[in-house]
Image: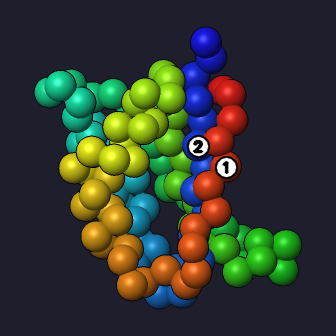
Amino acid sequence: MPPIVRLTLFKIPDPPTIHLALEKYTTLAQDALKDGKPYIQLSAGHTAHADPRSQGYTFIARTVFLGKEDMHYYDEECKAHGAIKGLLRGKVEGAPVVVVMDG
């Protein structure tokens, strides 16, 4: 089974919050542990260009998992992901868009 690539698009209006999200996603693959070991294959944060085609989305998070089980753990149990959710709670306009695909 190929790896799973997940893109999450956020509308974050505050540039300092975007910077904090970039920092968190830069270290997420090392910080996120499952059974005491890193389980995310790759994580990165990206800022979107200020372009009408971006439709107001300002930040994109990219994560790569070996399988659906790891992605489910990320959503439901991962403490590092929980910390990011806490950081962004109340600072994102609308619901994020999540796109999941084979890598």
Tag 2: amino acid? Arg
Label at residue 29 = none
Image: 23 above or below 77: below
The quarter of the picture where residue 3 lies is top right
Label at residue 99 = 1
Disc 2 is placed on an element classified as strand
The quarter of the picture where residue 59 lies is bottom right
Residue pointed to by mark 2: 6
Image: 2 above or below 74: above
Image: 9 above or below 103: below
Q: Position of residue 84 (x, y in %)?
A: 32, 62
Q: Position of residue 64 (x, y in %)?
A: 51, 34
Q: Residue at x 22, y 50 (%)?
A: 79
Q: Earlier in the sequence, mark 1 or mark 2?
A: 2
Q: Are marks 1 and 2 in contact (CB under 8 Å)?
A: yes
Disc 1 is placed on an element classified as strand
Q: Position of residue 99 (x, y in %)?
A: 67, 49
Q: Position of residue 83 (x, y in %)?
A: 25, 61
